[in-house]
Image (cartoon, rainbow, N blue to C red):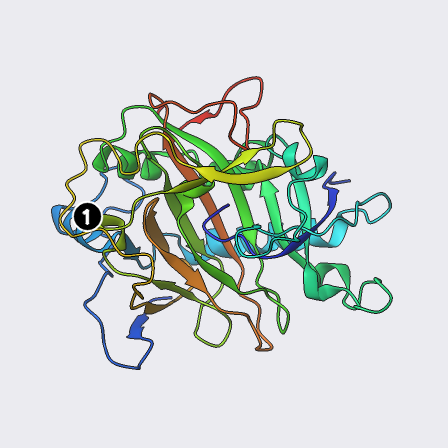
Amino acid sequence: MVTEVPNLIPATEYRKPHKGWSLKLCDGTMAPSATTSNSSRGQGQGLTAEQLQTYKEAGYLIIPNAFDASTTASLLHETQDMLSNFSLTDHPMTKFSTGQNDENAHIGDHYFLTSGDKIRFFFEEDAFDASTGELSKPKHRAINKIGHYLHALNPAFRKSTLNAYHAGIARSLGFRDPRVLQSMVICKQPEIGGKVGSHQDSTFLYTDPPSAVGFWIALEDATEENGCLSFARGSHRRTPVKSRMVRKKDGSGVEFVDVEGAKFPKDFELKEKEREEDEEEEYTLSEVKAGTLVLIHGNLLHKSEKNLSEKSRFIYTFHVIEGENKYDERNWLQPPSVGFSRLYS
């Protein structure tokens, strides 16, 4: 559901008592750059014409140093504090998966479906001993992600989300009423951080027409070794959103159904022929430094590999949708009583 949705196991909810980048294709050759400078950080001026053009063409945009070292360190410290202090006393042990490639996967239990207005913790599947079902890692090294209401309930993450800088970016992208509907820290733990298969964010956060944009912020360096993102450059222009994750009618979980509404954003100019089902995409491996912001189009295909290294890959991500577009009651994530958070003040 998110920019990244690996295999997870829900735990319990939380109650608190550098410059540089590299961009390589999977075969090791250099790819056209989707990285730009960040001269307007903190001013709310939005994207430059060059940045906007890069985003429109590639479907993603890498902005180094969007978050200064102090802010990044603060968010990382806040994350570690939450991981250390959440309770294991009453957590459910239900396995969670995107369900797209696993017919037997259980997904969308009550703990997950009611997390939209809470801060909850979801375990890595490989953090458990397969024979005993017991944790094989310390709890702070066992969590895959924290979500999905950090941007409202945690002051540090709220300040780093609902601000003039991101509002300026949203204006540049043409949003009229941008709403932040979910936020997460994804941990990519050392040795067990799960692989995330190729997906589109609008599959999990569908509006009619599609409008989701992911704001992905590296809290630590993301490298090939610890599972950085890979993008199918330009795939947002040729890959429709054909399925969406919805709540089952009996309330027992979620399922994937065919999209009956629009499959591309409003006024979207389809410049390339739609991709055939069996046609393989070429992915660009994108290593970034801590503090980097990556904007990800909701139709763009992207993925990440399992983290087999000894270094974690913590990131913070939130998603924005167009508040004027239809967001129906079938979506797994339903708005809190106050509605989704406005990005424009």
Query: Which element is circle 1 on?
Result: helix
**Count of all numbered marks drawn on residues in the image:** 1
The percent position of residue 19, horizontal first and vertical second, equals 33, 67
The percent position of residue 72, horizontal first and vertical second, equals 48, 55
Residue 64: name its quadrant: bottom left
Residue extending farthest to the bottom is: 28
Q: Closer to the camera, 194 or 223?
A: 194
Question: Circle 1 sits on which residue?
Answer: 56
Q: Is residue 14 left or right of residue 316?
A: right
Q: Specify the amino acid type for callout 1.
A: Lys
Task: Give the position of the C terminus as an image quadrant.
Answer: top left
Query: 50 above or below 136?
Result: above
Residue 282: name its quadrant: bottom left
Q: Is residue 120 left or right of residue 215?
A: right
At 28% from the left and 53% from the top, the residue drawn is 60
How crowded pointer 1 is (Cα within 10 Å; few <14, some 14-19, many 20+) is rated as: some
Q: Is residue 41 left or right of residue 57?
A: right
Q: Closer to the camera, 207 or 257?
A: 257
At 79% from the left and 45% from the top, the residue drawn is 92
Residue extending farthest to the top is: 337
Query: 233 above or below 47?
Result: below
The percent position of residue 206, horizontal first and vertical second, equals 41, 34
The percent position of residue 205, horizontal first and vertical second, equals 45, 37
At 19% from the left and 37% from the top, the residue drawn is 268
Residue 32: name its quadrant: bottom left
